[in-house]
């Protein structure tokens, strides 16, 4: 029934909500029930199946009402979480706590051990090795492209 053109003033829901305590929902609200619609043009039997699906599904919003938490309960929870003592802040003018170590201890520059002493592998090398083995596994497939096979040969050092 699409014969009318131009502006159609909405009747339900309200066109505009009032201010403050006079405000009302303008989307139809949770009491607005949407009816099932028959969709024509579907293959045999699917139209009725769609109607059954629509009528079995809940068409109303069933939003649970949140339970507000009292501020005293939030404060008590915050107090319980602080069981670990914070690390004390060392002032700049305090005596050195590790006099036998260089300032660059653990850094990749200057004297002293580097990050390699931590026993961690370089993430770039690990990522490269994983990618290399993945490309080689893909290139081993009989249906892989010649470009992928050439890339696998380059990664193996056979230029």
Image (cartoon, rainbow, N blue to C red):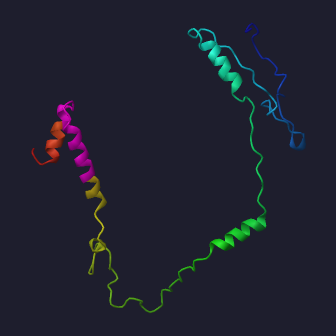
Give the percent coordinates (x, y) of residue 13.
82, 27
Give the percent coordinates (x, y) of residue 91.
51, 86
Question: Taking 152 as reference, is 65 left or right?
Answer: right
Which image quadrant for residue 19? top right
Q: Residue at x 81, y 22 (%)?
A: 10
Vertical position of residue 140 compared to residue 78: above or below: above
Vertical position of residue 9 compared to residue 104: above or below: above
Give the percent coordinates (x, y) of residue 25.
82, 35
Vertical position of residue 113 compared to residue 55: above or below: below
Tell me which secondary structure the magenta stretch mostly adopts: helix
Give the percent coordinates (x, y) of residue 104.
32, 79
Q: Residue at x 58, y 11 (%)?
A: 42
The stretch in magenta equals 129-148
Question: Taking 139 as reference, is 159 left or right?
Answer: left
Which quadrant of the rendered structure holds the C terminus? top left
Vertical position of residue 2 compared to residue 122: above or below: above
């Amino acid at each position: 029934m699409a014969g009318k053109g131009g502006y159609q003033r909405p009747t339900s829901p309200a066109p505009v909500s009032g201010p403050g305590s006079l405000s009302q929902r303008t989307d139809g609200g949770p009491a607005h029930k949407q009816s099932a619609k028959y969709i024509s043009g579907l293959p045999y039997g699917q139209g009725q199946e769609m109607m059954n699906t629509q009528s079995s599904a809940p068409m109303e919003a069933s939003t649970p009402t949140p339970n507000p938490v009292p501020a005293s309960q939030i404060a008590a929870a915050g107090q319980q979480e602080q069981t670990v003592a914070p690390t004390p802040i060392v002032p700049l003018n305090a005596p050195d706590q590790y006099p036998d170590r260089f300032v660059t201890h653990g850094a990749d520059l200057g004297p002293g051990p580097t990050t390699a002493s931590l026993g961690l592998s370089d993430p770039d090398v690990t990522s490269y090795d994983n990618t290399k083995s993945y490309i080689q596994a893909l290139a081993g497939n009989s249906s892989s492209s010649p470009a992928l096979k050439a890339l696998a040969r380059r990664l193996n050092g056979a230029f």
